[in-house]
């Protein structure tokens, strides 16, 4: 949770099929989705309809399938065609698209119906589409209300803490979706939506055509290679998305757990407290992780155990908050009281941050920094 690999950059790295997608990585419990008891009941209410319905037949269903069909048609017409050098006629010949004799919202189809993958074609699998849409719609509503796909309603907390699960790569779930505008993203309020929109007719086409797609932001594994670390400078995001600090902490666990140094440290740096409130959103999830499940104790203990046979003797978590505003006291107290203890710092400028990081690296005592207080 909290790491996104977005294949939409400028330098050559990834081409081929994967360059059509954005990859979102989330650390979740062994189950993710709505409460099975309530969710399955809602799905079963319409199951009889789903079993006999092979094509949209009500006005609302036809309007929905038309909207879906139109989005795919636009993507193939404006992106896939130009990027691959194919006209609509060529894509029909290849079997990627079908030209419809009748079309419109009252019919449920657009001028062309496109999907190169027959397994996901709307009109060949409409009953499955309806059932999947119920699940997807429910998950997206919960995501929208909580600013994150991982929240108190979707996480299986017991599963996440079982058997070292959150320290393994099994805890990382990858969602693929085509690059495009924010409005086309399934989880458009999540922290990984802090990426600027792309232009259908220019940037996307050129990236796919030239196979120059590269993540704008991506995970860097543990390394001593300064050239790899310097790649941070090439990452670019924009402001405006919600904050989910604990997401980053969780996503780091499978990475840090691979380390075999005698001392391991996770350093969390944030310019904001988790979005939401005590009842919803990332903040509610963080409070539950900290107060109910004692997350940070579990993290420290796990880093001493993994990987198997590690000589690690000390594991620490540090929290650095970089702004002094109305959120500061709450943020510092939350992380001090329920996670990092005395390893909590306020550093509001570059030099202060460097001083704190240097102190951590040298295992020396680090002074709590607050420029608004007298020395």
Image (cartoon, rainbow, N blue to C red):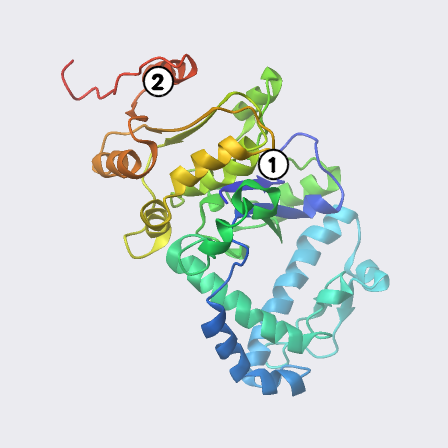
Q: In the depicted view, which residue is nearer to us: 238 or 40? A: 40
Does 285 sit left or right of 186 as displayed?
A: left
Callout 2: 10 Å neighbours few (<14), some, many (20+)?
many
Q: What is the count of numbered marks? A: 2
Residue 319 placement (x, y as % from top left): 35, 30
Does 134 sit left or right of 211 as displayed?
A: left
The residue under label 2 is 356
Which of the 4 quarters of the picture holds residue 355?
A: top left
* Residue found at the far right of this picture: 93
Residue 267 placement (x, y as % from top left): 42, 28
Q: In the depicted view, which residue is nearer to us: 289 or 357? A: 289
Callout 1: 10 Å neighbours few (<14), some, many (20+)?
many
Q: Are marks 2 and 1 in contact (CB under 8 Å)?
A: no
Which of the 4 quarters of the picture holds residue 216?
A: top right
Which of the 4 quarters of the picture holds residue 104?
A: bottom right
For label 1, the SS is loop
Q: CA distance from mark 2 to mark 1?
A: 30 Å
The residue under label 1 is 215
Can residue 34 be seen at all in this image of the molecule? yes
Residue 43 placement (x, y as % from top left): 53, 77
Q: Residue at point 51% right, 54% down?
A: 159
Q: Considering only vertical position in the picture, is 242 above or below 215?
A: below
Q: Residue at point 16% right, 13% down?
A: 375
Residue 25 placement (x, y as % from top left): 56, 45
Q: In the depicted view, which residue is nearer to us: 242 or 253? A: 253
Q: Considering only vertical position in the picture, is 320 above or below 206?
A: above
Q: Residue at point 38% right, 56% down?
A: 146
For label 2, the SS is helix
Does 331 sit left or right of 192 as displayed?
A: left
Q: Considering only vertical position in the picture, is 58 above or below 215?
A: below
Q: Residue at point 30% right, 39% down?
A: 338
- Please tell me which of labels 2 and 1 falls first in the chain: 1
């Amino acid at each position: 949770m909290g790491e996104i690999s977005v294949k939409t950059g400028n330098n050559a790295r990834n081409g081929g099929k994967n360059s059509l997608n954005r990859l979102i990585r989330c650390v979740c419990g062994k189950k993710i989705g709505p409460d099975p008891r309530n969710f399955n009941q809602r799905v079963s209410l319409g199951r009889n309809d789903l079993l006999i319905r092979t094509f949209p037949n009500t006005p609302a269903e036809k309007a929905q399938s038309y909207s879906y069909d139109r989005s795919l048609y636009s993507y193939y017409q404006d992106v896939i065609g130009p990027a691959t050098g194919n006209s609509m006629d060529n894509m029909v010949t290849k079997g990627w698209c079908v030209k419809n004799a009748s079309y419109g919202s009252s019919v449920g189809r657009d001028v062309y119906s496109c999907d190169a993958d027959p397994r996901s074609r709307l009109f060949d699998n409409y009953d499955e589409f309806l059932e999947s849409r119920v699940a997807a719609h429910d998950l997206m509503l919960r995501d929208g209300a909580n600013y994150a796909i991982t929240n108190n309603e979707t996480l299986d907390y017991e599963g996440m803490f079982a058997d070292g699960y959150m320290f393994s790569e099994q805890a990382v779930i990858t969602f693929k979706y085509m690059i495009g505008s924010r409005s086309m993203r399934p989880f458009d309020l999540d922290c990984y939506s802090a990426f600027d929109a792309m232009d259908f007719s220019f940037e996307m086409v050129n990236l796919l055509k030239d196979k120059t797609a590269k993540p704008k932001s991506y995970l860097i594994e543990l390394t001593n290679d300064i050239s790899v670390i310097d790649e941070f400078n090439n990452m670019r995001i924009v402001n405006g998305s919600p904050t989910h600090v604990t997401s980053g902490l969780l996503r780091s666990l499978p990475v840090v757990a691979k380390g075999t140094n005698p001392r391991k440290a996770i350093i969390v740096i944030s310019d904001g407290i988790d979005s939401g409130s005590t009842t919803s959103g990332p903040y509610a999830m963080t409070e539950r992780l900290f107060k109910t499940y004692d997350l940070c104790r579990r993290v420290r203990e796990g880093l001493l155990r993994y990987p198997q046979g590690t000589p690690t003797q000390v594991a620490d978590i540090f929290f650095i908050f970089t702004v002094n505003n109305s959120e500061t006291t709450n943020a510092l107290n939350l992380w001090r009281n329920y996670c990092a203890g005395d390893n909590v710092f306020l550093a509001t400028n570059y030099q202060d941050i460097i001083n704190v990081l240097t102190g951590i690296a040298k295992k020396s005592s680090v002074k709590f920094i607050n420029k608004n207080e007298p020395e």
